[in-house]
Amino acid sequence: MTHGPGQDAGGDANGHDEPDWPGLAHPRMRDELLDYLDGLSDLDYQQKVWVRREAHPGVKHDELDYAIHFLFDDTGLARAPQASIGAFLFDEAEARAVQDVTRALDAVLDQYGTALTDAAYLAKPEWQHVVDAAQSALQALKQPEIRIDGQPVIVPTNGTLRAILNDPRYLDRLVYTPGTRPPIAHLITFVLDHANRFSLGLHRVKHPAHLWMPVALMRPHGHWQRVHIEYPACATCGWRGPIANPTEPSLYFGVPEERQALARAWALPRTGCPDCGAALGRPAIWAGAAGKPGST
């Protein structure tokens, strides 16, 4: 556990202080949720820290009550976890995984009440259901795989993206080859520079089977949207800068319903030039500050 109650929060291993979950409105709450799930998933930690009050690296104090308050009182996760999608959960699958944890806790509290010691709860046979559910939820949230246009897409954390810039291997595939590194490294850098708005997704392709296919992602209207980052010029005022174009056909190669997904992209509201408001020559659902490729 790294940032739970009574713990020391800070930047990541690279000295960055920004949240590590691009595309979410409240990524630090996701970090907090992961910490609580980490504690709920580890019986040894519970006995050591909750029961025996022994020291644990980075933890000043922790107990079961903290996790219960976070899940049931501080957030709406126990009542309506789907409401946290886009805030600090990525999709319905994550909401269901967290809901399994709160239901397992509910079952224990309903049967034994709320006045037992942590040691007494841990001794109940039903407590193993809590641990199992937390382990499953932790695994689902640490390496989020979401479905976009019916296609499974993995969304690496910012820290993972920085590591990929130095080493292209991620899980069982390569994100880039020596020949494709320059454009993909630029895309990764762009996403990191605009982490409050963009994410990078990776999906598998059949050919070549050893590579990931990277794609820039946005969440403009409550759903994930793949986009192509381009740098057009405004014919009216001369502005040139990055835009997010969802209508590039190559974005949808391999999705189950390619034509329907592309049609939905064409129906999205457009944005104009950020300087003069004129219509741009390319479809855009977002336009950023003026700049050339590689300068953002």
Image: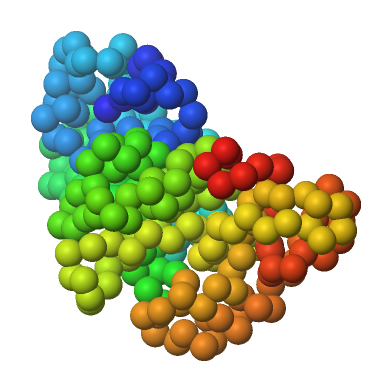
- Residue 151 image position (x, y, % from top left): 37, 74
> Which color scheme does this rendered protein use?
rainbow
Total tally of numbered discs in the picture: 0
Image point (46%, 85%), residue name:
258
Q: Can residue 84 be seen by looking at this rendering?
A: no
Instruction: Answer above or below: position of 227 versus 179.
Output: below
Image point (47%, 72%), residue name:
251
Q: Is residue 284 left or right of residue 63?
A: right
Picture quadrant of residue 35 = top left
- Seen from the viewer's position, the closer of residues 284 and 157 is 284
Picture quadrant of residue 127 = top left
Image point (63%, 55%), residue name:
231
- Seen from the viewer's position, the closer of residues 165 and 144 is 165
User: What is the quadrant of the C terminus in the image?
Assistant: top right
User: What is the quadrant of the N terminus in the image?
Assistant: top left
Instruction: Answer above or below: position of 294 versus 57.
Output: below
Q: Can residue 259 be seen by looking at this rendering?
A: yes
- Residue 249 image position (x, y, % from top left): 51, 78
Picture quadrant of residue 273 = bottom right
